[in-house]
């Protein structure tokens, strides 16, 4: 089953948000929400996001794409990437990482073909970051470009992807100081993207989920506007992913909103470790069920 609630409503300033109802897993399923916004400066939203569910495999695929290359081109490329990757991962054979990498490569081919067939789309491309959540583990992240995956564990935040950009490369090589990277005029120069070359290089890595973790996929409209520590503070301040992504977008726009901003957040539930908490929850459930039965019986007698 595909649950592709993607994205940006081009030309609007309103949020596009999805709560992604499931369930897909037998137990401990992450609570997922996503949202995108055109930002304060741009007129068109070139970001896209989506979720694709495979109950038979116990997998949930999350995708965020940030389009490049003209208003229409970037919008088309990001949407194509989300759809093609989702279709390939759901319908493909093999293990999760193989299907995910194949899906990214198929999306790259589709974007290239479309740009060659339609001159108005010439030069379009997109970044991509995908998280394949697997109930039986391990999960997998795949990315191309500078859209990111963050892990929020405890009070900390770690970026699990490396930006494929000129500025990020200069920082890693020690040529540019990290504090100078945010204001560097070359920060938007991407070294890898889908739809640019026939042979795309895809970064893949295993991700080990732990109860209580949060996983945030986002475009550079978020991490380019606010620091990682602020992202962590916003996410950790609220329990609901729907509220967290809304507050993240508000923070990015308050910081200038220079780009489209998209966030998809998956929170892995923590176990009920407090003594007696599970018993209290069960008692509350039974009480609610008994109340419904009494109301139903009373209605029948009144009739």
Image: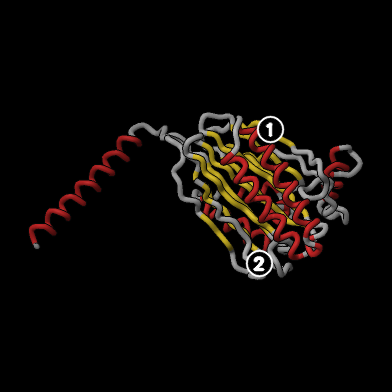
Image height check: is 10 above or below 108? below
- Which residue is at a point 65% across and 38% down the rendered structure image? 100
Q: Position of residue 274 (x, y in %)?
A: 39, 34
Residue 91 lies in quadrant? top right
Residue 161 lies in quadrant? top right
- Which residue is at a point 67% across and 43% down the rendered structure image? 149
> Spatial distance from mark 1 to mark 2, Cα to Cα?
32 Å
Q: Which mark is residue 205?
A: 1
Where disc 2 sits, the SS reads loop
Residue under numbered circle 2:
10
Residue 101 horizontal side relative to residue 238, left or right: right
One can see residue 288 in this view: yes
Mark 1 vs mark 2: in front = 2
As drawn, the residue found furthest toward the front would be 117
Q: Position of residue 188 (x, y in %)?
A: 82, 54
Q: Position of residue 58 (x, y in %)?
A: 50, 35
Q: Check disc 2: other Cα within 10 Å, few if <14, some if 14-19, many if 20+.
A: some
Where disc 1 sits, the SS reads strand
**Which one is in front, 179 or 151?**
151
- Which residue is at a point 65% across and 43% down the rendered structure image? 130
The image shows a total of numbered marks equal to 2
As drawn, the residue found furthest toward the right would be 175
Identify the mark nearer the N-term, 1 or 2: 2
Image height check: is 63 above or below 254? above
- Which residue is at a point 55% across and 55% down the rendered structure image? 5
């Amino acid at each position: 089953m595909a649950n592709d609630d993607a994205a940006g409503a081009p030309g609007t300033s309103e949020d596009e948000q999805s709560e992604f109802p499931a369930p897909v897993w037998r137990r401990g399923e992450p609570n997922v929400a996503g949202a995108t916004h055109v930002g304060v400066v741009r007129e068109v939203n070139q970001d896209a996001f989506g979720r694709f569910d495979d109950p038979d495999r116990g997998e949930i695929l999350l995708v965020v794409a940030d389009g490049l290359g003209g208003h229409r081109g970037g919008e088309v490329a990001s949407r194509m990437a989300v759809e093609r990757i989702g279709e390939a991962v759901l319908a493909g054979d093999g293990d999760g990482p193989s299907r995910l990498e194949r899906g990214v490569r198929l999306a790259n081919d589709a974007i290239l073909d479309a740009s060659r067939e339609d001159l108005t789309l010439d030069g379009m491309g997109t970044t991509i970051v995908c998280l394949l959540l697997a109930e039986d583990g391990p999960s997998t992240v795949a990315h191309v470009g500078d859209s990111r995956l963050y892990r929020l564990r405890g009070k900390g935040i770690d970026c699990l992807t490396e930006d494929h950009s000129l500025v990020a490369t200069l920082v890693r090589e020690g040529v540019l100081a990290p504090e100078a990277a945010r204001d560097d005029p070359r920060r938007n120069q991407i070294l890898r993207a889908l739809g640019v070359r026939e042979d795309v290089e895809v970064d893949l890595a295993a991700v080990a989920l732990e109860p209580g973790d949060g996983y945030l996929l986002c475009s550079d409209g978020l991490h380019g506007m606010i620091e990682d520590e602020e992202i962590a503070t916003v996410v950790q301040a609220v329990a609901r992913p729907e509220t967290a992504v809304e507050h993240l977008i508000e923070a990015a726009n308050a910081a200038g909103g220079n780009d489209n901003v998209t966030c998809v957040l998956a929170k892995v539930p923590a176990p009920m470790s407090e003594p007696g908490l599970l018993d209290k929850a069960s008692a509350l459930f039974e009480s609610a069920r008994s109340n419904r039965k009494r109301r139903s019986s009373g209605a029948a007698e009144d009739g």
